[in-house]
């Protein structure tokens, strides 16, 4: 019986110590992120950086509804973008406003209540249902054969075919139409 090795706890082994340290780091990271998001850390007067963009003067509704196999959120895709005064409440009324971009097309994504516009400079601007306007991406030349152009954001790129259909790929590689392009 004197030759039996002493049983040690998992937490006293190197893998156990590394697991414990990783768990503590993860817990502290989540706590810091939560406190920061709640505004309890850092500069409480700092505001997120957004790029205010003027809305178009008028907004056309789609000439034809999307295909019957798809669903869209009703009401939100035909709403007018908010007035400029709603976009930048902190800006003084007497300050000169930047030149309003000219919208050349509108992107509609099935099930997305936000409106997206492409400017004549190929910038893509999003307007959420509350009226906040942000720069979301760029219209870029096609990188895939068969597409007229690419709808590129910092996180994902969609293909737009010559008929104005917006495409993405499912995880299994199958293409799926996720929206369409129309006039602004």
Image (spheres, rainbow, N blue to C red):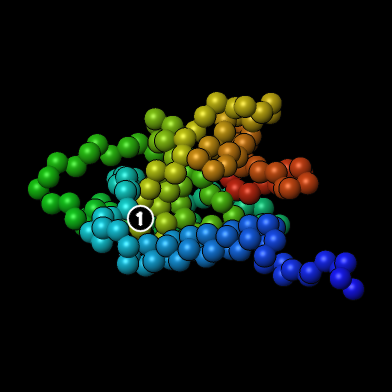
Q: Where's residue 156, x and y in %?
A: 57, 42
Q: For the image shown, how many numbered marks are present on the structure?
A: 1
Residue named by callout 1: 132
Residue in the picture at 45% in, 66% down: 31
Q: Where's residue 114, x and y in %?
A: 47, 55
Q: What is the quadrant of the C terminus in the image?
A: top left
**Side of 2 where 129 appears, left or right:** left
**Residue 34 visible in the shown view:** yes
Mark 1: few/some/many CA within 10 Å (<14, 14-19, 20+): some
Q: What is the quadrant of the N terminus in the image?
A: bottom right
- Camera-nearest residue between 25 and 80: 25
Q: Examine the image and state in which quarter residue 131 appears.
A: bottom left
Q: Examine the image and state in which quarter residue 159 appears.
A: top right
**Side of 11 where 31 appears, left or right:** left
Q: Is residue 134 above or below residue 26?
A: above
**Side of 96 where 13 appears, left or right:** right
């Amino acid at each position: 019986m004197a030759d039996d090795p002493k049983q040690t706890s998992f937490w006293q082994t190197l893998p156990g110590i590394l697991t414990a340290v990783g768990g503590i780091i993860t817990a502290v990271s989540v706590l810091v992120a939560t406190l920061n998001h709640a505004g309890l850390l850092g500069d409480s007067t700092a505001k997120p950086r957004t790029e205010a963009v003027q809305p178009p003067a008028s907004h056309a509704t789609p000439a034809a509804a999307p295909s019957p196999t798809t669903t869209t959120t009703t009401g939100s895709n035909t709403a007018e973008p908010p007035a400029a005064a709603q976009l930048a409440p902190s800006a003084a009324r007497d300050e000169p406003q930047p030149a309003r971009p000219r919208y050349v097309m509108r992107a509609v994504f099935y099930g997305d209540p936000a409106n997206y516009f492409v400017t004549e400079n190929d910038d893509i601007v999003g307007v959420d249902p509350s009226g906040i306007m942000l720069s979301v991406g760029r219209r870029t030349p096609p990188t895939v054969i068969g597409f007229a152009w690419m709808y590129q954001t910092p996180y994902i790129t969609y293909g737009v075919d010559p008929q104005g259909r917006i495409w993405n790929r499912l995880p299994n590689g199958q293409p799926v139409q996720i929206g369409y392009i129309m006039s602004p």
